[in-house]
Amino acid sequence: MHDLTKEPWVNYNYKDWLAHFKENDQARLQLDFSEEPVLTDAQRKLIFKSIKAFQMGEHSEGMYLVHLAEKFEKDQNEPPFAETMLLFIKEENFHSAYLAQYLLHHKEPKAKRNKLDKIFRNLRHNGKLFTEIAVLVTAETIALSYYSALGNVADQMGSKALRAICNQMLHDELPHIVFQTYTLSHFGNKRSKRFFRRFVMRCTTLAVYLMYGKLLKAGGYKYRRFHKDNFAYLKQSINMAANMCKKD
Ligand SMILES: [Fe+2]
Ligand SMILES: [Fe+2]
């Protein structure tokens, strides 16, 4: 577990976030498959179902999110939020591309549809930026446990390329959680909002474990740990949002 409250990101405004994403954009991961092992059928069965789902989930055209971001920027007088959001979406699309490269190397087709992805997207698109970001940050929190588990499985398989992808994801997703938290803090600290976030986390934690529990377990995440870590990060995010509210 990482203590996000100790990171400098907690004091960032949108100008700082824009600089952060611009800096990340200068140094993207270059994957090296020269030492990639041939995977056994059992290994393929263990990893590809969830990798395909996350590859799809990380990808976004972002039109809807950008539209809401432009409105938020105007309403809250918070430039450069929309521009920052564009770079954030670009970074997420890099995440999707890393996983796509891994699938391609192993000649695995990408997923055409995924039930969980559909549920997530439907849940997000209710016309409110708060809902969009609250659901998005839930997925990103869960991704921390997922990529930690997948990284452990990559080590077991001897895949340096997959380990590098997981490290990059963890490096990028930790600040994403603080970035989304900052935006959520603009919507106040009402009980109903905190309830909504806990409710989404409860449903998602269960659904993801039901679908990808085998991989998570193989990577050291039994349900208890998965649940505990997800809710501990949620608690950090809720507390950070409350403190950020007070600052304004
Ligand atoms: Fe991502
Ligand atoms: Fe993210």
Image (cartoon, helix red, strand yellow):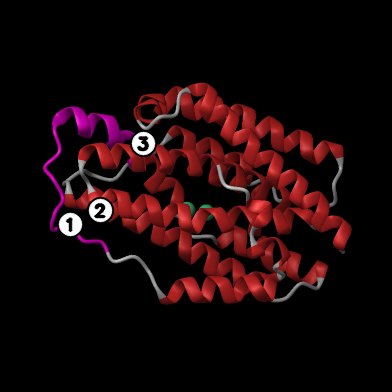
Please rate how many residues cluster around mark 2, counting C-alpha atoms within 10 Å: few if below 14, some from 14 to 19, many from 20.
Answer: many
The x and y percentages for residue 138 are 60, 42
Residue 161 is labelled as: 2
Question: What is the quadrant of residue 193 in the picture?
Answer: top right
Is-magenta flag for residue 38?
Answer: yes
The secondary structure type at the circle numbered 2 is helix
What residue sits 49% from the left and 43% below the top? Answer: 143
Q: Is residue 95 visible?
A: yes
Q: Is residue 121 left or right of residue 10?
A: left
The residue where tag 3 is placed is 50
Q: CA distance from mark 1 to mark 3?
A: 20 Å
Q: Is residue 187 visible?
A: no
Inspect the image, locate mark 3, and give the three-letter code of the amino acid beneath it.
Answer: Ser
Is mark 1 in CB contact (under 8 Å) with mark 2? yes
Of the pair 65 and 103, the residue shown nearer to us: 103
The magenta-colored residue range is 31-51
Which dot, 3 or 2, sits closer to the camera?
2
Mark 1 or mark 3: whose residue is earlier in sequence: 1
The residue where tag 1 is placed is 33
The x and y percentages for residue 35 are 14, 54
